[in-house]
Amino acid sequence: QSPISVIDENTISCPSPHLPDLNHAPIKTEISVEFKNTTIFAESRDAVIIVPPAMLLGLRPLGGSELGGTEILVRGSNFREGVPCSFGGIMSPSILVSSSQIKCTSPPRGIQ
């Protein structure tokens, strides 16, 4: 069981179950909501997939042009499609190379 937060009359939020370690494969789990010992919602068609957090181990090169356009190879673990890169708060899309590498392109410096 997990505690819930009521967002509005149609939406609740709850944390995912505890993950046993950071190196496990994604886990599929079903969701059910109980109120006063009565199941009021149970979703069995679609399972929620819980994935371990991405972890950064290093990157190369460590510098680049102020004009941007430098390709950065980011090394880590648990990367998946859509993990963004952020350069000083400026988001940049990534290219998934593997679960342990993504490539990002630096934006021009000073762009807000």
Image (spheres, rainbow, N blue to C red):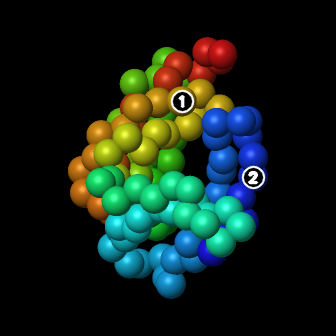
Give me the residue at 56% from left, 37% from top: 86
Helix, strand or loop under label 1: strand
- Position above or below: 10 against 4: above
- Position above or below: 18 against 73: below
Question: Could you say where residue 10 lies in the image, as x and y percent from the top left?
Answer: 64, 36
Task: Tell me if I can see residue 40 in this picture.
Answer: yes
Give me the residue at 32% from left, 45% from top: 81
Give me the residue at 41% from left, 32% from top: 93
Distance from disc 1 to disc 2, alpha carbons, whole Å, reads 29 Å
Residue closest to the far left: 97
Q: Nearer the viewer, residue 52 or 35?
A: 35
Give the residue pinned by disc 1.
91
Helix, strand or loop under label 2: strand
The label on residue 34 is none
- Image quarter where the N terminus lies is bottom right
Question: Could you say where residue 8 lies in the image, as x and y percent from the top left?
Answer: 73, 36
Q: Nearer the viewer, residue 73 or 64?
A: 73
Give the total of numbered labels.
Answer: 2
Give the residue pinned by disc 2.
5
Q: Residues within 10 Å of mark 1 (few under 14, many from 20)?
A: few
Q: Amino acid at mark 2?
A: Ser
- Position above or below: 36 against 92: below
- Position above or below: 12 against 56: above
Residue closest to the far bottom: 20
Q: Amino acid at mark 1?
A: Met
- Image quarter where the C terminus lies is top right
